[in-house]
Image (cartoon, rainbow, N blue to C red):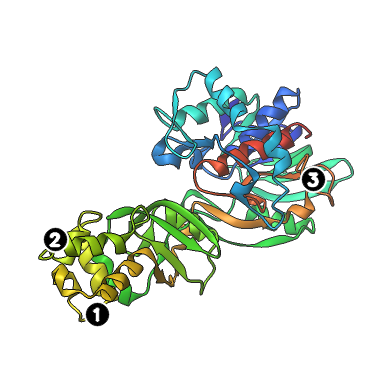
Amino acid sequence: MSVSVTTPLPEKIDVLIIGAGAAGLMCAIKASQRGRSVLVVDHANKVGKKILMSGGGRCNFTNIYTESTNFLSQNPHFCKSALSRFTPADFIALVNNHEIAFHEKKLGQVFCDDKARNILDMLLQEARATIRTHCSVEKVSALDNGFEIETRLGKVRAQSLVVATGGLSIPKMGATAFGYELAKQFGLNIVPVRAGLVPFTLDKIILDKLSQLSGSSLEVIASCNEMSFKENLLFTHRGLSGPAILQISSYWKPGDELTINLLPDIDLNEVLQEKQQTRAKAELKTVLAEYMSRKMAQLLIELWFVDMDYANKVMNQFTKQQLQDIAERFHSWKLKPSGTEGYRTAEVTFGGVNTDELSSKTMETKKQKGLYFIGEVVDVTGHLGGFNFQWAWASGAAAGAFV
């Protein structure tokens, strides 16, 4: 493997991969193991940017509980073939071979003990390929037997062309719509794209009330459209984030209502009724402070029960019905986000190349022989927690076995 920005490109190559991210590098590994000559080009200034930034710099590189149900697509069965042929255990075996220390954090999420750079270095060592950065693709033409690719660094002819360009998420890292545009050039259908695994924004009235909670978090159950996730919620200066919110954003569309259970591990009505007997003179916010901060309890009560001064009332001043109403609000906070933070902070891009256009076995397009699409550019999107990396490895390995 060599990474360069100056060495001339080869005139001919067996496999040209556009995109030096997770899927592209895995495809390069599998193709080169078969003796294929491989060139990977990327318009960015360095390879594997998402790998390096993921998991807080420790790379949540897979999830040991990966199932097809952890992925969203117009065809929910499409991902099964690739995922069954390259599993989390397969990637972990590769990690073990390179003696990279790792740990399971929670819910099957696997992270490096040290840093994400270990995973990227492993992939680069495994890929017997030539890699060129600062090498944007300017034109792709189909030939009778392969493709001619015009790049910033010159022309290349390739028998197989693999598109691993990712989606639109995090544009500051160089994300573009190139993969979708190339798919359209070859007559492929695109499932409409949108930001995925993304924080919600709230309207100004709610935000003004909750702004003091920015940085505060607690474990909740977030629900929307018959799907629920129990994870942390984080209040931000723009709205709501945290794993529970990122997960449920996958199932939310503009105008939909969220339901958030802020105290999923207790029956708050039962607790309040009991506290009314045992702590009659305690303020409501003091009782609630056993389960969240006093500030959070007060601000939420003020948001939901305007002008009632509930937060400062003592327990024996409430009727049973009022306590029941308070409990119901904490267990079932209903709100409509004003939107999301968009691609700027989105973990992934939903939608992409329609899976009906591709072979689930090889990732090759049905309309153009020798053309493959893998990774995030395809309409397969995983839940938060290592699933999207596993799709990148699996789809890259699937294509790499056939290119």
Which residue bears the numbered disc 1? 306
Q: Which mark is residue 36?
A: none
Q: How many marks?
A: 3
Three-letter residue code for mark 2: Arg
Q: Which mark is residue 279?
A: 2
- What is the C-alpha distance between the residues marked 2 and 3? 65 Å
Disc with the residue nearer the chain's start (2 vs 3)? 2
Residue extending farthest to the bottom is 307
Comparing marks 1 and 3, which lies closer to the viewer? 1
* 335 sits left or right of 80 in the view: left
For mark 2, give the secondary structure.
Answer: loop
The residue depicted at 56 percent of the width and 31 percent of the height is 4
Q: Position of residue 377 (x, y in %)?
A: 64, 51
Disc with the residue nearer the chain's start (1 vs 2)? 2
The residue depicted at 53 percent of the width and 24 percent of the height is 95
Residue 221 visible to the viewer:
yes
Q: Are marks 1 and 3 in contact (CB under 8 Å)?
A: no
Residue 345 visible to the viewer:
no
Which residue bears the numbered disc 3? 359
Comparing marks 2 and 3, which lies closer to the viewer? 2
The residue closer to the viewer here, 98 or 93, is 93
Residue extending farthest to the right is 144
Point out the image quarter for the N terminus.
top right
Disc with the residue nearer the chain's start (1 vs 3)? 1
**Picture quadrant of residue 260:** bottom left
Q: Are marks 1 and 2 in contact (CB under 8 Å)?
A: no
Q: Is residue 132 above or below residue 174?
A: above
- What is the C-alpha distance between the residues marked 1 and 2? 25 Å
